[in-house]
Amino acid sequence: MPARRSPKKKSRKPKVVLAKNKVLVFCGLICAICVSAIAVSVAFNPQIAEKAKAVEVSKTAEKAKVTEKPKTAEKPKAAEAPKIAEKSKNAEKPALVEKPKPVEKPKSVEKTKTVEAPKIVEKNDVGSQKAVTKPVEKTGVTVPKKVNASSAGASQKNVQVASLVTPKQNEATVQNAVRNRFDLPPASNGATIVIVIDDAGRSAENTRKYAELPFPITIAVLPKLPQSRQCADVIRSFGKEVILHQPMQAANLNLDPGPGAIKIDMTTYEIAEVVKQNLQELGPGVKGMNNHEGSLITSNEIKIGAVLEVCQEKGVYFLDSRTTAATKAPQAALERDMQIFEKAGPYLDNDIDRAKMLERMRETLAYANRHGRAIVIGHVDKSVKILPDLLAEMYPEMRAKGYKFATPSMLR
């Protein structure tokens, strides 16, 4: 009798056939996926070509095993398929990690930082660019190394803030240095400086250099010179004070005081007429007069008295230049119950030397601190190449130290 087949064997035959077909299809799909994955990874990263070849060899070996022993290959295939997939995934992961290697942007960020920082300095620089660029370069180098490209905007703001603060600090230090350049003493006792510049009338251009100084100043114009009226007009155009620099005869008769002068042999009437003509020549707005030379006239109470009477009549002040200690101008003014001014302080430009003129200005400030004010005199053409510039440089510091500037008419 033929042997009976067990029911188990009958039920296994169709399952084995169906499982074998499914396994073959499944293995074919896995192989196709792995081959495509390996091809892609090799295309992007040739360094893993050897790994791909090893995977292919293992796959071919697996195929042989599957064809030879399909029954035993069912379980390993199911277990090994994920392993192959894991290998392919591990092969793909380095490709994704290694892609950013050629695109490293920290260096480009550093370049843009170092390029942008100087631009900010150029825009915001107010005075000294050299002093500002060094700290900005340091911030531009250290920040990008730790900051990503996405946070570059925040670092740029920090650089801009630093570049904006530094010039203000530098400007403050520069201003302090300027204000203390001459090391002047602080003002005391309400110290007021009155500067009178004599001998205008020969050059309107030289006169302009004094008239454009940034503080109140008085300029005395000689009469009957080629540019006397022109100089007076220049002074008025700058809003400065014009006075008549009235020539008078000196005790040294060899000195020529110039045209329009008062002589010792003139009568009081003649003196009055000369002074009135000279005032009229300079035009409107003349505030006062002072003497040019004139030691012989100012020491004569009658002669100088005639000059003071014209001042009273015209409503102008008289400033005694004190060319002699024997002046009688104060006595003549007292008799007429009028106020006059006197030079009180040094001549600024007896020596045509910057250091000497600076020393005279220091003496002027010291005198003003002791007596409340100083009235000092310089000369237009004599010191035009030094004195205007020196006064302009000293003015900010004098003002910062509390000194006041005025004209004689402001003191009346």
Image: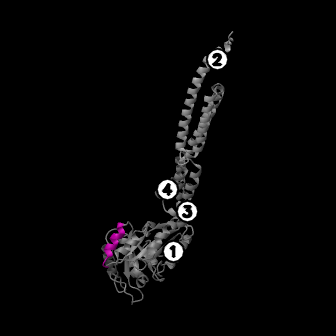
Toward the front, the furthest residue is: 1
Query: In front: mark 2 or mark 1?
Result: 2
Question: What residue range appears in magenta?
Answer: 225-237
Which kind of residue does numbered mark 1 sit on?
Met
- Residue 106: x %, y % from top left: 55, 50
Left or right: 66 as drawn, with respect to 247: right
Q: Secondary structure at mark 1?
A: helix
Residue, disc 2: 12
94 or 388, which lies in front? 94
Q: Could you tell me if residue 322 is visible in this image? A: yes
Residue 105 rendering spot, x and y as whole percentages? 53, 49
Q: Label 3: state its secondary structure.
A: helix
**Label at residue 361:** 1
Distance between the alpha carbons at the discs numbered 2 and 4: 78 Å
- In terms of sequence position, does the residue under pointer 2 or pointer 1 come before the other? 2
10 sits left or right of 281 in the view: right
Identified by mark 4, the residue type is Val
Q: CA distance from mark 4 to mark 1?
A: 50 Å
Residue type for callout 2: Arg
Residue 404: percent from left, percent from top:
50, 66
Element assignment for label 4:
helix
Q: Is residue 103 magenta?
A: no
Which residue in the structure is indicated by mark 3? 173
